[in-house]
Image: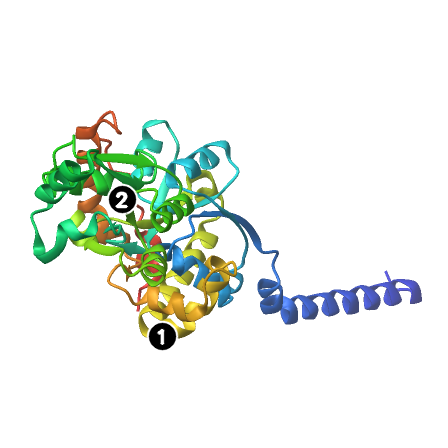
Amino acid sequence: MRPTRRTVTFAATFFAATLAASAGLLAAGPAAAQTAAPVPVRIGVIPVIGAAPIFVANGEGWLKEAGLAPTFTTFESGPNMIQALASGTIDVYVAGIAPLAVARTKGIDVRVVAATAIEEMVFVAGPKLAPYFADGADKAQAFAQFRAKEGKPARLATQPPGSVPNTTLQHWLWQVAKADKANAEVVAMGIDATQQAMLAGAVDGASIREPALTIVQMRNPAIKLVATGGEMFPDQPGTVVGVFGAFADKNPAAVEGLVKAVVRATELLKSDPARAAKPVEAALGKGITDTATITRALTSPAAKFTADPRQIIAATKAMQAYQVSIGTLDKDVPLEGLFEPKYYEAATKR
């Protein structure tokens, strides 16, 4: 059959359109990948220096670069954040490791994909209590002498039972300092309330972390650092990045991008704390502190950053065992499945 003018015109038009479309797709390929819709990610954080890597990753634009569209919600403690994780209102948990073991006993699928800091929690004594620890005095005796003179046990502020701060404080009091339980009273309250209570003299001591340590000592030099994080709980596991299992399964590339951003942020915190302080101050300062204070907090003895989740596995087991001994955890929980280091390994592969 001889082609008619109509069939020739149609064929030519179809070929031209197909060629144009193909060329357009080829040209738009890389751009299309770059302009793919970002993955919304709801991140829960506690306002502490240990969470600095996530603030730096966001402030430097590395989360956006990884294809993420983050929103942040601030919580007062890890246990409070677990409730949000269980209800499906956050996708990523940036807080202490201890509550995650409890969460797993309740069937909450959360996976630690990165660490952020270790040995964060330290113990400080207020103006009344601090003199009893002078010149390396025996810690148990210091608490006993305080009670003998004041007629009451020392009131010590920390976060709720099951949290890293609470667990660490109790470990230091009863296992390291060997204090008599009649001489120290542990009082649970929020992070901000702990800082305010220390400055107001409403408590005699507290387990705190940066930037609270820097802030309270700047405002009242009579508040003294009595025990470092390593003394309170050796290799103390601190803040981690945990991802809700359903989110990780649905968005593996997004999780890998998140961890890569955290690794970059951790490196910047170590190499250039002055630059890193700017996004951290924007997240934590709230007009209360300045960049110089945050820079000082980032370089204090209580600021030890690491992104490697494998580094805290052994210490997490030890902390979990201690939680069982004090009744904040019913029984040891197998850690298989809690730590998922493959994202970190991919992020650091050279």
The residue beneath circle 1 is 272
Looking at the picture, tell me which residue is in the foreground, 144 or 114: 144
- Measuring from the top left, give residue 126's x and y in whole percent: 26, 50
Task: Tell me the amino acid under the disc marked 2.
Answer: Asp
In the depicted structure, whether residue 100 falls above or below residue 47: above
How far apart in space, not on screen, are marks 2 and 1 (Cα)?
35 Å
Residue at 35% across / 68% down in the picture? 269
- Which quarter of the rendered picture does the C terminus lie within? bottom left
- Measuring from the top left, give residue 289's x and y in whole percent: 45, 63
- Measuring from the top left, give residue 175's x and y in whole percent: 11, 39
- Which quarter of the rendered picture does the N terminus lie within? bottom right
Q: Secondary structure at mark 1?
A: loop
Task: Tell me the amino acid under the disc marked 1.
Answer: Asp
Sort mark 2 into few (<14), some (14-19) or many (20+) by Cα contacts within 10 Å.
many
Q: Is residue 338 visible?
A: no
Left or right: residue 61 versus residue 121 is right
Q: Give the mark, 2 or 1, whose residue is nearer the N terminus.
A: 2
- Measuring from the top left, give residue 202's x and y in whole percent: 34, 42
Residue at 31% across / 65% down in the picture? 349
Looking at the picture, tell me which residue is in the foreground, 198 or 64: 198
Q: Secondary structure at mark 2?
A: loop
Left or right: residue 45 versus residue 113 is right
Left or right: residue 291 versus residue 332 is right
The numbered mark at residue 303 is: none
The numbered mark at residue 204 is: 2
Looking at the picture, tell me which residue is in the foreground, 301 or 219: 219
State how many labels appear.
Answer: 2
Q: Is mark 2 in CB contact (under 8 Å) with mark 1?
A: no
